[in-house]
Image (spheres, grey):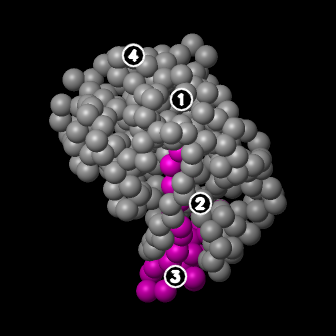
Amino acid sequence: MTSPDQPNPEAVSDETLFGADVADYARYRPGLPDAAIHLLAATQHGVPDPVLLDLGTGTGQVPRALLPVLRRLVHIDLVDVHQHMLEAARAALEPVRGSCTVSAFTGEAHTFTPAMPGLAPTLITSCRSFHWMSRPRVLAMADRVAAPHAVVAIMGDGSLWTHEADWTATLRRLIQTYLGDDRRAGTRGTYAGPGRPYEDDLADSAFSDVSEHCFPVARAWTPEDVLGYLRTTSFARPALFADRYREFEAEALGLLKAHARGGVLKEDAEFTVLLARRPGGAA
């Protein structure tokens, strides 16, 4: 069974930022490395009834990948500011959740309150989304709702904007000729990065016992897949280009095809997982 969504009256649900085409988001955003998923599952070894709280869940990539590996999950809380993303996440989980219950909370992560207070999260995840959040307040919320032995996992691998390769550098310059030198961030203006390392945020929180785990990831993109991915980003979504988007898309496709080798564009990335516990928590 699943429980009803929890609407939050203070939710900031900016569908123009990521929610315009949820299908593109689900199709083109890269998944998580298997090694990272198994690392998350291992943190729940010995936990009788694991409960997952996934912050900034998007289309549910983390729980969808974790459920087949951590079959003992008894409950999942999904949190996102985008109602359409939550609907997509719940639909993606339905065929694989088994007896695991699912609740969805529409709102900013730091405002989360459990739908089922008796099920304190034992694993709290944020994948490629922590930089959008009010991080100290999110970690304070996590301290309030999490089980004593809970693990917080902050994960990510940058984006094609930050990846350094000939083809991504050329693509970035093309985007800048249309939108300006500063990286755009949707309706939030420009993006200046998180300001300080996530390790510092964690060090100042209750979850100050931190370990870092890095996994190399090799990806092969087609030019068309890159364009699909760009449509889901805050820095190159179609609305930013207004009536010049078709012009940009045609120019970008030509550029990407020129750089592709055998129709493929290679990305060698590194997926990083920060596991954080309260001092004295189980290793």
Q: Which residues are magenta?
A: 248-276
**Residue on which the image places disc 1:** 142
Q: Is residue 255 above or below residue 39?
A: below
Q: Which mark is residue 159?
A: 2
Q: CA distance from mark 3 to mark 2?
A: 18 Å
Q: Residue furthest top?
A: 9
> In the rendered view of the protein, which quadrant contains the N terminus?
top left
Whether residues under marks 3 and 2 lie with C-beta atoms below 8 angstroms apart, the answer is no
Q: State which tag comes first along the sequence, 4 or 3.
A: 4
- Pointer 1: residues within 10 angstroms few (<14), some, or many (20+)? many
Q: Is residue 71 above or below residue 101?
A: below
- Pointer 4: residues within 10 angstroms few (<14), some, or many (20+)? few
**Residue on which the image places disc 3:** 260
Q: The residue tagged with tag 4: helix, strand or loop?
A: loop
Q: CA distance from mark 4 to mark 3?
A: 51 Å
Q: CA distance from mark 1 to mark 3?
A: 44 Å
Q: Position of residue 240 (x, y in %)?
A: 69, 48
Q: The residue tagged with tag 2: helix, strand or loop?
A: loop
Q: State which tag comes first along the sequence, 4 or 2.
A: 4
Q: State which tag comes first along the sequence, 3 or 2.
A: 2
Q: Residue furthest right?
A: 181
User: Quadrant of the rendered structure where residue 116 is?
Assistant: top left
Number of the front mark, 4 or 2: 4
Q: Residue type at mark 2?
A: Ser
Q: Residue type at mark 1?
A: Ala
Number of the front mark, 1 or 3: 1
Q: CA distance from mark 4 to mark 2?
A: 36 Å
Number of the front mark, 4 or 3: 4
**Residue on which the image places disc 4:** 117
Q: Residue type at mark 3?
A: Ala
